[in-house]
Image: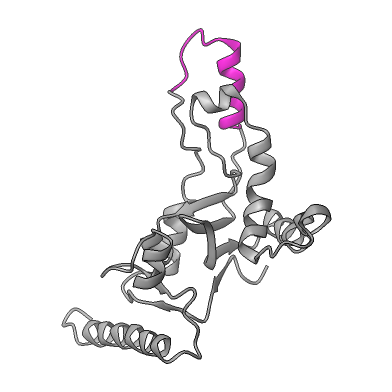
Amino acid sequence: KRYEWVLWIDCDAFFMDPGRTIDSVIQMYSGNTTAATRLGPPRFGEPLEAQALRSRLQPAQPREVSLIVATDSSGINNGVWLMRNSDWSHDFLWRWWHSDILQGPGKNHNCSDQSTMQHQLLYDSSMALDDAWDSVEGPLWVPEVRVAAQEHLQSFHAATAATVASREWQEGDFIKHHPGCHYYKLPCQQLYLEAHEIFIRKVQMMMSSPGL
């Protein structure tokens, strides 16, 4: 294995915080393998049903986090995402590339890479939901996936943020993404330039800091 993690970043996304590292985002979202649920700590004399649910939610061998994505109001936005170089990731990439939603009734539908990715990540787990899982608000995403807050992975330029009711880039956010704003359009080129200049100014300020 040459690389432990790989970052995919679209050409219309720009790093905005030189003080934050990619490693810090990975650690933030992959360091804890415990599923977030409303299931409390184990109790003496716990019913067998509760023990069975606990074993589903908290297996003896936790699965390592292999994919970190961000979502907006329309679902996954895969303009920026992080993937571990793992067996699970290799298998997922194969399944994503060969997604079956492009067959049968879906063959004439314009399924984007994002909807296809979301289908592969959520379909099986959503079909396996039951009342016991819902009672403790068990996670919908598979254990290998973590959904990052947009400010930690990608927040949007103003127009797209308003369109999809999602986070507009704010000072301190890691990456500014411009989905739907194409490079060949002059207003978008200006937004790209502004993002670049903001980052350069921040780097220059860091370099001139007496502490460096």
Q: Residue furthest right?
A: 104
Image quarter of the N terminus: bottom right
- The residue range painted magenta reads 41-59
**Nearer to us in this view, 189 or 147:** 189
Which x, y percent locates residue 193?
Answer: 36, 89
- Front in this rendered view, residue 24 or 161: 161
Position of 70 with respect to 64 (left or right) is left
The foreground one among 49 and 132 is 132
Name the residue at the left extreme. Answer: 210
Q: Position of residue 26 (x, y in %)?
A: 47, 60
Q: Quadrant of the C terminus?
A: bottom left
Q: Is residue 11 magenta?
A: no
Evaluate whether residue 102 shows in this view: yes
Farthest top residue in view = 45
Q: Residue at x 36, y 69 (%)?
A: 174
Q: Is residue 157 visible?
A: no
Vertical side of 140 occupied by 135: above or below: above
Image coordinates for residue 40, horizontal then vertical, percent: 43, 23
Q: Could you say which quadrant of the image residue 61 lies in?
A: top right
Q: Which residue occupies 46% across, 14% down? A: 43
Horizontal side of residue 197 vs 209, given as left or right = right
Q: Is residue 12 above or below residue 100?
A: below
Residue 8 locus on image (x, y percent): 56, 71
- Taking the spot 33% from the left edge, 69% from the top edge, the residue there is 169
